[in-house]
Amino acid sequence: MSGGRVESRVRNAELPMPRAYRLWFEHTTKCPDCKGKPKAQDGCEAGRELWGAYRLARTGRTS
């Protein structure tokens, strides 16, 4: 038996709401059309779609 600790290779499933927000946030930090916009609906189409997915996940209606 080795003295090292055992690491799990299975990644924990990410919850839908934080995942949707993370995807939107990562998009807005890279997209020149979305970066610095005060509202999500002022961004590009992809950014608006990601924000819509976040809103659905927030209310529990994930698709």
Image: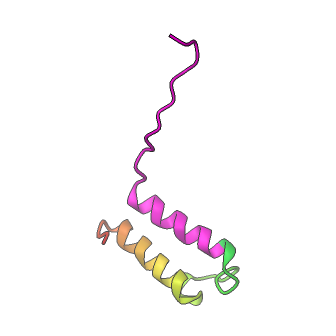
Residue at x-position 59% and y-position 69%? 25
Residue at point 43% right, 41% down? 10
Q: Name the side, left or right, on which 10 lies relative to 23.
A: left
Q: Work out which quarter of the rendered image holds the C terminus and state it.
A: bottom left
Q: How many marks?
A: 0
Question: Seen from this angle, which residue lies furthest front?
Answer: 1
**Residue 4 image offset from top left, x and y in percent:** 58, 18
* Residue 59 in the image, given as x and y percentages of width and height: 33, 68
Q: Is residue 10 above or below residue 31?
A: above
Return the x and y of residue 27 as percentages of the image width and height.
60, 73
Please determine whether, in this image, residue 58 is positioned above or below residue 47.
Answer: above
- Quadrant assignment, res 33: bottom right
- Hey, which quadrant is residue 37 in on the image? bottom right
Examine the rendered structure and indicate whether residue 49 appears above or below residue 63: below
Q: Is residue 49 left or right of residue 40?
A: left
Which residue lies at the image location 52% right of the left edge and 89% below the top edge? Answer: 45
Q: Which residues are magenta?
A: 1-28
- Verify whether residue 24 appears in magenta: yes
Residue 42 left/right relative to 14: right
Work out whether residue 28 or residue 39 is closer to the camera in this orientation and state it. 28
- Residue 26, percent from left and from top: 61, 68
Residue occupying image coordinates x 48% and y 76%: 50
> In the rendered view, how is the structure colored?
rainbow
Q: Is residue 56 magenta?
A: no
